[in-house]
Image: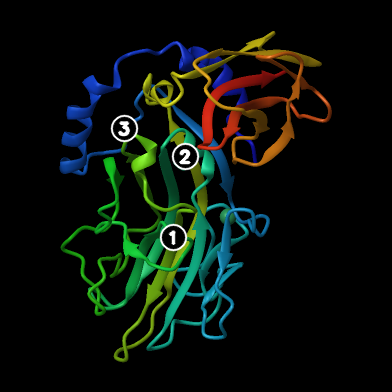
Amino acid sequence: MYLACAFIYQHSKLNEMKKMFTLLLPLLFMASVMKAQVDPFKGIFDIDSCDFSVDCSNLLVIDTTASNLWIIGLPQKPFFDTASSPPNAILTDTINVYPQGNHSTFVMDIPDFAFFNTRNFLLTFKHKYQSDTLLDGGYIDISFDGGLNWVNILNDEHPIVAFNSENLYTDQDSLYNNELGFSGTSDGWVTTKIQWVWALPVAKLQGEDPKLRFNFVSDSLGQGQAGWMIDDILFSYVDLGSSTRNLSRRVQAKVFPNPMANGAEVRIEGEITEAYTLHLYDLLGRELQALTRKGTDTFWIDRADLRSGMYLIQSRNKTGQQFVGKVLVE
Ligand SMILES: [Ca+2]
């Protein structure tokens, strides 16, 4: 599942890219207005992926109500006769056409690493759809409060620097319930990419635990068709250049050696005004260890059972987490 680690090291200039983000902001706002193609900035790095050869429960949760159509399995019906990467995909039933009056969902967490640390997220997936045009279909909404409130990603007014997409529905694609979405019959498999770059500073981001929800809806009329089928989901982020440094200019972590083999010393440099601890996280934001303090401003990372790859070092204090550094484990 960890695709990116080796590539990240090749692009370890990540930390050296110091172009002023303020210079980029006007360009980014233009990109936002134009709903441009996905912008790779200084490089695209993959966090995780799912081809449905496993249940992908680390990435998505299917609603469990009885009427929910989404299922991970072998497509066995007209138009949905094979997955993009066989055998499995996630689809609105493997055998039957969709019924009338249905609303089926599954939910994906946007990784903390993308939302809080790199503040950008690139979602890529392949899909096919077949539904009554501009009536039944599929759409994606987003929540920033753990799933209480949702808004269509095209209507999201959260602080954002750029929202780019390829092969996404548009503001002309209104379904029967007035949500914008995919409908009609897709031209075979379509690859859709959606990119968010959330605004700085991160403190302005309201809420937490951002989630995406995939909805399929059908009205009370017409013949059911195949519905919506999705496969080969990819989670990525881009290197925005210097922007990740702006958050952490008060506190920098220097790691020696980096890459590390059995262990490394971490030295904290910068203005530190309150007590803090350091923790090691993986790229999905999972805390793996609290670093051992060796001196006033020095800590030790122990290899322990860390697998090869990129990890993040973050400080914790009363004001919350602050991204301070990266370490590559050989
Ligand atoms: Ca597949």
Mark 1 highlights which residue?
145
Label 2 packing within 10 angstroms: few (<14), some (14-19), many (20+): many
Report helix, strand or loop for mark 1: loop
Q: Position of residue 80 (x, y in %)?
A: 48, 68
Q: Is residue 260 visible?
A: no
Report helix, strand or loop for mark 3: loop
> Given this view, does label 2 or label 3 mark the residue nearer the observer?
2
**Residue 150 vs residue 134, the one in the foreground:** 150
Compared to 247, does 31 lie above or below? below
Which one is earlier in the sequence, the residue at label 2 or at label 3? 3
Report the colour scheme: rainbow
Compared to 191, does 263 lie above or below? above
Q: CA distance from mark 3 to mark 1?
A: 27 Å
Query: What's under tag 3, amino acid-wise?
Result: Asp
Find residue 36 and report its image quarter. Answer: top left
**Residue 201 vs residue 76, the one in the foreground:** 201
Which residue sits at x=24%, y=59%? 155
Indicate which disc residue 39 carries.
3
Which residue sits at x=31%, y=57%? 153
Mark 2 highlights which residue?
116
Q: Position of residue 34 (x, y in %)?
A: 16, 41
Mark 3 Cβ inside 8 Å of ligand 1: no
Find the residue positioned furthest to the right: 304
Q: Is 315 situated left or right of 117 in this image?
A: right
Query: What's under tag 2, amino acid-wise?
Result: Phe
> Given this view, does label 3 or label 1 mark the residue nearer the observer?
1
Q: CA distance from mark 2 to mark 3?
A: 19 Å
Instruction: Write down which quadrant ligand 1 falls in.
Output: bottom right
Q: Position of residue 114 (x, y in %)?
A: 48, 39
